Amino acid sequence: MKVLVLNGPNLGTLGRREPEVYGHRTLADLETLLAGRARGLSIELLCLQSNHEGQLIDWIEKEGAQSDAIIINPGALSHSSLALADALRGSGKPVVEVHISNVFAREPERHRMVTAAAAKALISGLGFEGYLAALNFLATLPG
Ligand code: DQA
């Protein structure tokens, strides 16, 4: 199984960005953690991060087509991007959307979930553990 892991805007600054919300660990720490779990589950991973909506859509089109499933944290695009939701839906692949923080415990603007409507599942508030839970879940899907 091959899984595409996408992180959207501002997730490249994890560790420095609002550590009281997102913690002190970096995106590189997250990707190392995921690589370890993926090895144990015999999953091949491709991890990519971009601050740009169009780049994320291009990766969903190109890399998503070569993958069996997608894990995505779209950052703030989660609350607004119909284009990203359309790309995820169009991929035809099982998608798990992950948020480090519990968006429903935050400002009302973050309660509007646009891209999650295109996902099979939504995990919010488990910190980095949410990405691991997503991988564990995807590993249970029939190949
Ligand atoms: C986030 C939550 C979003 O509301 C926010 O814009 C982010 C990070 C999270 O992982 O908790 O950039 O997606």
Image: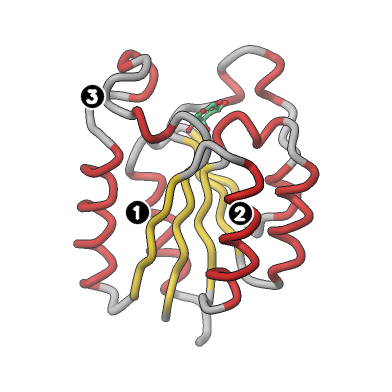
Q: Is mark 1 within 8 Å of ligand 1?
A: no
Q: Percent position (x, y) of residue 8?
A: 52, 40
- Place residue 1 in its image quadrant: bottom left
- Binning the other alpha carbons within 10 Å of mark 3 as few (below 14), some (14 to 19) or many (20 upward) gives some
* Mark 3 in CB contact with mark 2 (< 8 angstroms): no
Using the numbered discs, state the Cα–Cα distance from disc 3 to disc 1 in whole angstroms.
18 Å
User: Dot 1, crowdedness within 10 Å: few (<14), some or many (≥20)?
Assistant: many
Q: Is mark 2 within 8 Å of ligand 1?
A: no
Spatial CA span between label 3 and label 2: 26 Å
Q: Is residue 96 above or below residue 64?
A: above
SS class, disc 3: loop
Is the CB of the residue bearing disc 3 within 8 angstroms of ligand 1? no
Q: Taking 12 as reference, is 69 above or below it?
A: below
**Please, what secondary structure does the residue beneath circle 1 have?**
helix
Asked if residue 55 is positioned above or below residue 99 in the image, the reply reads below
Left or right for 11, reference 84: left
Q: Which mark is residue 24?
A: 3
Residue denoted by label 1: 132
Residue at (76% x, 66% y) in the render:
90
- Tell me: residue 46, above or below residue 109: below
Q: Amino acid at mark 1?
A: Leu
Amino acid residing under circle 3: His
Label annotation for residue 121: 2
Q: Quadrant of residue 119?
A: bottom right
Dot 2, how many residues are within 10 Å of its Cα: few (below 14), some (14-19), or many (20+)? some
